[in-house]
Image (tube, rainbow, N blue to C red):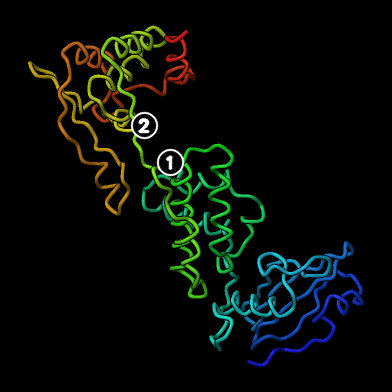
Amino acid sequence: MAKPRKISLETPTARARLPARKKSYFVRVAPNVALGYRRNQSGFGTWSVRFADGSADWLKSFGIADDLEPADDKTVFNYDQALKQARVLARGEADTETTATSSAPITVAEALTQYEADLKARGDSIYNARGPRRHLGAQLFAKPVALLDSKILRRWRDGLLDRGLRPSSVVRYAKSLAAALNLAASQDQRITNKSAWEIGLQSLPNASVARNVILDDATVSRFVNASYAHDQNLGLLVDTLAVTGSRPSQVTRLLVEDLHGGSRPRLSMPKSGKGGGKNRTTRMEERVSVPITPALAAKLKQSAKGRAADAPLNLISACPPVSLYVVWGNLTE
């Protein structure tokens, strides 16, 4: 493929002669596609790609020109490298005649936003999309997904370990980011670099070691009693957790009608949404019978007195703002 020529843009020396201005200098790369160079007062020029067909136009910046530092083909690009990146962003491949797409290339930040919307629509936890955001720098946020490579992502993953995060947390964030990038790739044929995150965000060894803490009965009783002492509703929540062994997300979804008394009291416990999957929302609506002690049944019945059958069984929302860690801290002082 012949290289588009633009003498004034091809070398740092030639670009240094251009007047600094807000408007970019452009060279045509392909039908409806142009490579742009913006000369800044600082001397650091920037590259961009523009698509314009008269109906849908977009402009996307993607890197720094090698005006004051050598090109690395990662964040700093010479003219030939910038031409290649422009074609990748516009068409998905640098060496084909694939028609350019009228939509702007999606960035990592936009991919996470789309992933969060998808999770919300499917009834899944949006935390999976928000978790990685706290650990992504501005440069990676703004990076087009189509220009990611395994080295960039591997450096980000390993950097989380250097900052002291647990391997299991690093793997969780990496999986969430990979899921967002996979969703973006499924919606944009220009994104052909899935191997970048398959390699760069690989799971860490020994990251799935269980962190179970088994408490003896005496400690559990102390925890329950301390919770009751702090607040009656908090005590009922912790007591129910201790007796049933369920997750807080399950217990807080219990309704008044889920309490069954009699000689063998029980709760119709909602299933956990743990594990994801397409049927997660449906599974969380299912219930299983869990036996409880007569003492807990009596407390729950008294607490639910006068409330409708479809009202929450546990009024944890009525508790004063408090973390269970505060109660635990009081026990260990």
Badge 2 density bin: few <14, some 14–19, many ≥20, Cα 10 Å: few
Q: Are marks 2 and 1 in contact (CB under 8 Å)?
A: yes
> Residue 14 appears in which quarter of the rendering?
bottom right
Q: Which three-letter amino acid code belongs to the residue tagged 1?
A: Ser
Q: Where is residue 104 drawn, in percent x and y?
A: 60, 71
Viewer-proximal residue among 149 and 90: 149
Specify the farthest residue to the left: 263
In the foreground, 270 or 135? 135
Which residue appears at 58% of the width and 77% of the height?
A: 102
Q: Find the distance from the CA under tag 2 to the CA under tag 1.
A: 10 Å
Circle 1: is it few (<14), some (14-19), or many (20+) Cα within 10 Å? some
Compared with 204, 189 (above or below) is below
Indicate whether 258 appears above or below 133: above
Is the N terminus in the top left, top right, bottom left or bottom right quadrant?
Answer: bottom right
Q: Under tag 1, what secondary structure?
A: helix
Say above or below: 43 vs 297.
below
Q: Is residue 215 left or right of residue 69?
A: left
Rendered location of residue 184, percent (x, y): 48, 64
Give the number of the disc on residue 168.
Answer: 1
The residue under label 2 is 211
Name the N-terminal-most of marks 2 and 1. Answer: 1
Dot 2: element: loop
Q: Which mark is residue 102?
A: none
